[in-house]
Each structure stands twice: as C-alpha cells, then as structure tokens.
Amino acid sequence: ASSDAERLTSLLEPLKTYSADFNQQVASGGGSLQNASGHMWLSRPGRFNWEVSDPYRQTVVSDGQKVYLYDPDLEQVSIRPLDQRVTHTPALLLSGQASELTENYNVSRRQQGTTEFFALSPRSNDSLFESLELVFNNERLSGIDLTDGTGQRTEISFRNIEVNPDISASHFQFKIPEGADVMREGN
Amino acid sequence: CATQAPSQKQDRLPGDWRTQQSQLEALDTWTAAGKVGIRTPEDSQSANLDWTQRNDQYRISVSGPWGTGRNTLEGNGRQVKLTNGDGTFQAPTPEELMAQQMGWSLPLSSLVYWVRGLPDPRGPHRLSEDDVGFPDTMDQAGWHIDYRDWSQADGLWLPRRIIMTYDDIRTTLVINRWQPGQADLP
C-alpha cells in the first residue's frame, strides 16, 4: 500500500551512509549451503562496498557508475554498468533512491513489536529474486531476507551498525589488482 | 637468497601422494564449497560453487553474490535435472543441460576424478608430477589441467585450485572447503 511505501521511504531517506558487519546465510531445500560474513559500506545514492571475508573472499563495489565484482580466489574482476537490472541486488537496492525502490517494487509492511518488515516484490519479473524483505529494528535497518525463483532463501543480518558515519570515498573506488583477469560486460 | 615463505600448514611431503592415492581413489563421498570461473573469448562468469557427491549421486549448485541467480544440478548416473529461477529442466547428460541453461559446461563425468587429482580411468591421459610427487599437470580428452594449490582435509591432501583449459576455454576451480566423507543428499 502507498502508506507502507511512504513509511519505507521515510526510514530510508535519512539514511545517507551506512556501515555494518553482515552475516549471510543461504538456506535451500538441502539444508543451509553457505554461510558467509563480512562488512558492507553504503553511500546513497548508488555507491556501496559489499565485502565477504569468511569463509571465502569476494567483493562487490559500486562507485555510482560501474559495479565491480572481484573474486580473489579466481583472480577475476567483472565490471558492469550500474543499470536498472543490477538494482535488483540487495546492496544496490539500498543505495538507490527511495523513489526508485517504490517505483520498482510493491511494498507491504508488517510490524512485530519494534521490528518493521517491508516485503518488496518486483513489479517486473526479470528480477534476480522473487521477494525481498527489509527489516528495520527501532527504525534502523537490521536485516535483509531474499527469496529467489527456486525458493532459495538468503538471510542477511547486520551488526555493529553505524548510521550516517562519514565514509571515505576510497571505499567506493575499486582498484583493479595486479594480474587479475578483467572482464567488462555491456558498457 | 630467496627464503622459503614460512607456511603455517604442514607442507606436502614426497611420498604423501603415493600413500594417499588409494584413499583418494576410494573417496566417493564429499561436500566441497568454493568458486568456479569460466573464461571464453565471448563470455566470462564467476560463481560460488557447492558440490555434494555420494557414489554417482550429486548436487552441484552455482550462484552469484547473495545466493542470487542460482542453478542447481541434481543427478545420478542415469538422469539429471537442473533447477533455476525459470523452472526445472532435464536433458540426457549434465553437460548438455549446463550448456543449455547456463551457457557453459564442464565434463562432469571426468571432473569427478580430476577434482581429486586423479585421471578419468575410462580414457588415456598424460600426467606430470611436481617436485614432491603430486600431480602437477594432466592432459586428458583435450583438457589441460593444472593443479596450482592443495589443501589438507581430515588428513587428505586435496586440490584447492585447478586451472583447466580446452582450446580457448579457461576454467578456474577453487575449493575453499573440502569435507571428505560427508554428503547431505536425499
């Protein structure tokens, strides 16, 4: 409902930058597959750094124009323009304009105590996921739950959260490591 | 002089491969988590990899960051199906199914040996060893396989990083976590 979308916008608008540790658990039919943790930085609009550090390493950085996916194990960097489709990833969803969010997703809200859940289902069906839920605890973003087309659930929870800290711009600039295979897609 | 970087984990020693080779040949059950990267002239992909195997039954799942865009291949010696966001698909072989649904494929029936550092017994191969007697490179069925790194799990040395090339296809397989003998399969 529009009031749910307005409430979500009112919670996201003041969130200019955000920094937190995250724990990501991917659970599918066959029990939980991969647990991963790391740190993420966000600077709205359009910039984020999502760094998985354990048990594997993988970094996704958006500088506002391009999105870099760096996999140190594979020594591969893929660079893609920051475009609509990519906004269907959780990180970009959060760093986009609140209005972009409510334009592209139906928003429905429910509350349990001081926790508000905003379920977003994409209006277009080319999204990477079927439904996504933003979780706010005492009006502060505390988690994201994602379900993809195969019913696979990814649950992301945030800890050590800093809202609107100053984050140096270098966090959102990706330096291509020596010797990495670079793949530019669709620029 | 170049000093050996002190490696915390125990090093692979000459003779280790010989003593564990029969165990590796007998190893038919594992859970492995890591990455797979494919590089062709037109396309390149990288994904997280989850591989569970027991005898000829397997579940291999590849997915992007945040577990999105997942493709899961489940099969046994006789039939195989692939499930992704668009539904469930079947084909006579896993290789065909991967090519149809994911645009790339790996020779799974041989990879089940290569991933343990072993040649596929059903065909000829050439093998070169490194300075401690472990497989260094292997050539089989048109593939050139480079064993770049090893890691130890439950006392077994298993490949950690494998580069496989075939004509202009370059595949990198990294196994970050080996769990030999474990498989959570229906």
Image (spheres, coloured by chain):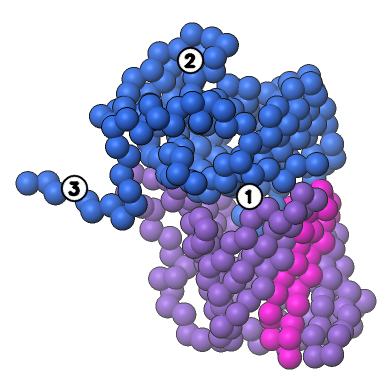
Can residue A65 be seen here? The reply is no
Residue A42: image quadrant is bottom right
How far apart are the alpha carbons under marks 2 and 1? Answer: 30 Å
Residue B163 is left or right of residue A151, and the answer is left
Amino acid type of the residue that numbered disc 2 sits on in the rendered structure:
Gln
Q: Position of residue A81 (x, y in %)?
A: 57, 53
Helix, strand or loop under label 2: strand
Q: Chain A hue?
A: purple
Mark 3 sits on what residue? Answer: B4
The magenta span reads: A124-153
Q: Position of residue A122 (x, y in %)?
A: 82, 60
Helix, strand or loop under label 3: loop
How far apart are the alpha carbons under marks 3 and 2? Answer: 33 Å
Residue B102 is left or right of residue A151, and the answer is left
* 3 or 2: mark nearer the eye: 3
Mark 2 sits on what residue? Answer: B140
Amino acid type of the residue that numbered disc 1 sits on in the rendered structure:
Gly
Relative to B94, say whether B71 is above or below: below
Q: Residue at x 82, y 56 (%)?
A: A130
The circle on residue A19 is none
Relative to B3, say whether B118 is above or below: above
Q: Residue at x 76, y 30 (%)?
A: B75
